[in-house]
Amino acid sequence: MKILILGSGGREHAIGLKLSQSPRKPVLIFAPGNPGMAELGTCHPVAADDIPAVLTLAKKEAVDLTVVGPEVPLVKGIVDAFQAEGLRIFGPTAGAARLEGSKAFSKDFMTRYGIPTAAFQTFRELNPALTYLEKTGAPVVVKASGLAAGKGAVVCQTLTEAREAVESMLGPNAIFGEAGSEVVIEEFMDGEEASVFAVCDGKNFTLLPTAQDHKRIFDNDMGPNTGGMGAYSPAPIMTPALLERTCKEVIRPTLDGMQKEGHPYQGVLYVGLMLTSKGPKVVEFNCRLGDPETQAVLPVYAGDLLELVLAAAEGKISDTVEFPKANRSAAIIVLASKGYPGSYPSGLPIQGLLEANTVPGVHVVHAGTKSKDGAAVTAGGRVLGVVGQADSLSEALKAAYQGVDCVRFEGMQYRKDIGQRGLKALG
Ligand code: AMP
Ligand code: GLY
């Protein structure tokens, strides 16, 4: 079986690693891939969101299954294009991917089906939005409705910040362009966050292990938001009781609602939750796996990912909600370039990759790297992820940080407190 994986980050490297472990021994190809993925199969220089070029590649290579990593091609309709040609692909159609691609759609959808989420209103014009802020007061959250590469949500502690955020999106500067032409203003929710991943076939779903991300750049959740600086799985705070509640109150009504509206949801439904004092509430839906959560979730998942993905793509998942056993843990520490999430240098040599990979229970995932004269150099904000696996979270973290100690590149920055909340939850 030949599988095409779309994307070029740590998440897609982790998907490739997991699929390569399937007893079916698939042949893997990547578009565009990175030096980590090049160790698993052939990389083709085709952008993941260039739908016609990806279609041509899939046909030329006689691919049996395409797995989409990032959200942009999904929101642009890559699944619709493949299905129109009778090609098998894992991921939601554009209609279903609106759960991530339009926060306004997603919030209205949750209201229609009574799915717990923060109270909100959406706006296309500046003045009504500013008037609404006078009513909500602060703290309050201002979000661009469209895709903004994880930068579109602003948690505002004061009304001044909230006014500035609204003006930056709906005013003349329109910093997110079309993606910010509609703005969601929502209630601030207090609590701890957790990520839940459901692999869905349109009607039914199976859960992957849970995770917790670390979005801020600095230790103790300080500094600006990033794509994610580390994660661990499973998240002990997501108890079986909370997961069961999430399935009943969020995932089941979402699948039923999407089906009813003519957009059955096939692919990964990523539920970003806030665990509030009133129970779990949805912060956001994403239409794909998380990055860097995937790098910790997939090593913990005990099943065959390929079988699961095939079952989902063919509508053959019977509701097998497995509550992940907590007898194995994984943690990923992201190694980022100096300056990230702002501007950063690239092309810097990386040392110690082989050494890190020899630490027991450790493997390194490539995110923003490229190959220069046969060696890996930095080529992105998030450069590498060091993954540790062990029987417990504390050992997985210890292994991951031992791996981190082996790797060096100029200006390398990483968080030293990944998993601390998980350890606290374990007591
Ligand atoms: P989003 O892009 O919607 O996932 O938001 C990014 C991050 O902003 C989330 O992971 C939370 O940390 C924070 N956030 C978003 N919405 C809220 C909210 N209503 N209350 C508190 N924090 C939020
Ligand atoms: N780690 C957050 C995301 O993938 O959206």
Image (tube, rainbow, N blue to C red):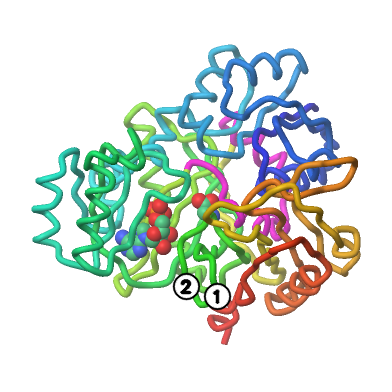
- Please give left or right for residue 184 compared with residue 2 in the image: left
According to the picture, the residue beneath numbered tag 2 turns out to be: 222
Q: Is residue 53 magenta?
A: no
Pick the quarter of the image with the N terminus. top right
Tell me the SS state at disc 1: helix
Other-residue count near label 2 (Cα within 10 Å), few / some / many at <14 / 14–19 / ≥20: few
Q: Going 59% across and 12% down the picture, which residue do you hit?
A: 85
Query: Could you tell me residue 187's position as x and y percent?
Result: 24, 61
Q: Quadrant of residue 264?
A: top left
Q: Position of residue 298 (x, y in %)?
A: 69, 54
Residue shown at 75% from the left, 53% from the top: 365
Confirm whether residue 394 shows in the render: yes
Q: Residue at x 10, y 45 (%)?
A: 127
- Evaluate if marks 2 and 1 touch, with contact meaning CB atoms under 8 Å apart: yes
Q: Amino acid at mark 2?
A: Met
Coordinates of residue 315 in the picture (x, y in percent):
56, 31
Q: Secondary structure at mark 2?
A: strand
Magenta-colored span = 287-315
The residues bearing labels 2 and 1 have C-alpha atoms spaced at a distance of 6 Å
Ligand 1 within 8 Å of disc 1? The answer is no
- Amino acid marked by disc 1: Asp
On the image, numbered disc 1 is attached to which residue? 219
